[in-house]
Image: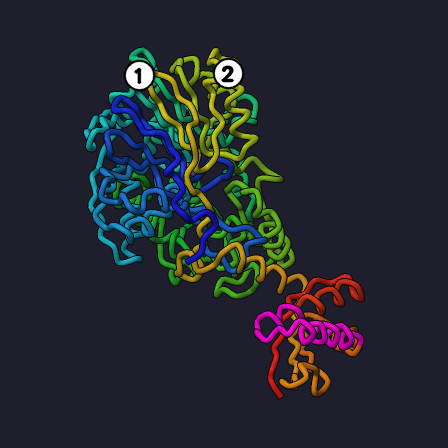
Amino acid sequence: MSRRGSRRRDSGLPPLPANGLRIVPLGGLGEIGRNMTVFEHAGRLLIVDCGVLFPEEHQPGVDVILPDFTWIRDRLDKIDAIILTHGHEDHIGGVPYLLRERPDIPVVGSKLTLAFIEAKLKEHRITPVTTEVQEGQRRRLGPFDCEFVAVNHSIPDGLAVAIRTAAGIVLHTGDFKMDQFPLDRRVTDLRAFARLGEEGVDLFLVDSTNAEVPGFTISEGELAPAIETVFRTGAGRVIVSSFASHVHRIQQVLDTAHAHGRKVAFVGRSMVRNMGIASDLGYLTIPKGLVVDLKALERLPANKITLICTGSQGEPLAALSRMANRDHPIRITEGDTVLLASSLIPGNENAIYRVINELTRWGANVVHKGNAKVHVSGHASAGELAYCYNIVRPTNVLPVHGEWRHLRANADLAIRTGVAPDRAIIAEDGSVIDLIDGRASITGSVPAGLVYVDAMTVGGATEESLHVRRTLAEEGVITIVCIVDPDTGQLSEKPDFLAHGFEPDAIDFDTAVPSIQKALTSAARENIQDLDQIEELVRRAVSAWAHRQHRRSPLIIPVIVDA
Ligand SMILES: [Zn+2]
Ligand SMILES: [Zn+2]
């Protein structure tokens, strides 16, 4: 398994004093996703979140990307717990892979978060050791005295966590926003933030996702008019696509559908599973008789039908993309209204617009973030963050969850509220931040490369294999079979060329033969016998020819066979 940066290289780290706390973000800094932070104190470890990152177009064939566990791998027995702040994939998606390495790491989280992770772990045939916590509770996990604080986000039951050790108090917001009128009336507990601030927050880890967005994130409830309009004006079926975890968004859709005398069916495995969990646990209230199975729904007239499905990010295997591609039993027709009640995650734009175009082509009216107010963010904007800094008055700040620009914007906000510029720390994945005597500073780094999960193999794809995949996709491949006379080292017949990704007649391969002959001649002159070395010389020669003649850099596979 060769991974980028997978060698353990932390021997250069300074020793951590007994009153010190080491904070190591292994993911989520410099990227949106795979959030994971490791805390070390008194020889013990505490992990907050363990998420995945979704691949982009330049990472073909990759399912998800994990944090690199190298730094903790030989100390798994020292982990006292993993705290999950909420149930989003970018915070819990990596847990099955961590538990594969040590299945009995205690998993700590709120009721809904644990239910989501347990359902996920069941698919991986793992039964976790769990500890359920609630806001307001305080729990000792090894040397870490943890207090859980309610935060509001785009999934119910989110928690921030305050961690008390001999090094002081650290407050980690998790993902959060400050909707003052959330559907469940569970607001971010600013009173707890203030109380912790009074006690003295030595280090504040703050969600940076929306730090560049000025003002305040509007309330989830403000989407009601746009959702209402869809149901009022939709003549036929209404098909809603959203994140399968956005319980409150789906609650709004359910209530509106009910008010308009429609019935609802959930479509897509994760949607059916999560909504079942959310309603069983009381986070989702389904009016009696509203939700029916798909068969019963299909017998109703179109204007009585609502479908709620996955695929709001254009994921190719999700229900909505398959409907758009006519690869799903639900056929989109004239009169259907499709509501994409979700964000547009950067990197997914092309896929989403492709889905919107296809749905429109089949006759659907597509309502989305770009043409109606059908989405609000789950993250605090700059205005809310500034309030938080003024309430908490932290000594040191570590912006988390964001690309570099988000972290910078968040640090700038902290500084504007009075945090000393050298105590607003912009760190990267793998940075080691030590909190000692009330001062946080970067003291080193540990491996934090991207670990690719590829059809269930962890680390099966490397940067190198992705490079090959990209080359294959963009440049094609040429295989050259050279039959060589072992005595002279020269071609004993004309080489065979097999090319893929080219028009067959576009290339005159005969023009490459002199380059190959030249390579073989120089190999013979140098008395090179090793086949691998000779193949490498031929590869370089053909590569130079392809570039010179055709301005292409295909993958070149020479095969040398003795005559
Ligand atoms: Zn989240
Ligand atoms: Zn997140």
Could you say which is closer to the camera, residue 282 or residue 299?
A: 282
- Residue 327, position in %: x, y? 52, 66
Could you say which is closer to the camera, residue 261 or residue 34?
A: 34
Is ligand 1 closer than 8 angstroms to the Cβ of mark 1? no
Q: Provide the secondary structure element on which disc 2 rests.
A: helix
Q: Is residue 3 left or right of residue 45?
A: right
Name the residue located 65 percent from the left edge and 83 percent from the top edge: 484
Name the residue located 42 percent from the left edge and 46 percent from the top edge: 52
Mark 1 residue crowding within 10 angstroms, few (<14) / some (14–19) / many (20+):
many
- Name the residue that disc number 1 marks: 196
The quadrant in which residue 15 appears is top left
Color scheme of the displayed model? rainbow
Mark sitting on residue 420: none
Note whether 226 is above or below 170 in the view shown. Answer: below
- Name the residue that disc number 2 marks: 421
Residue 370, visible in the rendered structure: yes
Label 1 is placed on what type of residue?
Leu
Name the residue located 51 percent from the left edge and 36 percent from the top edge: 30
For the record, the magenta segment spans 511-537
Q: Quadrant of ligand 2?
A: top left
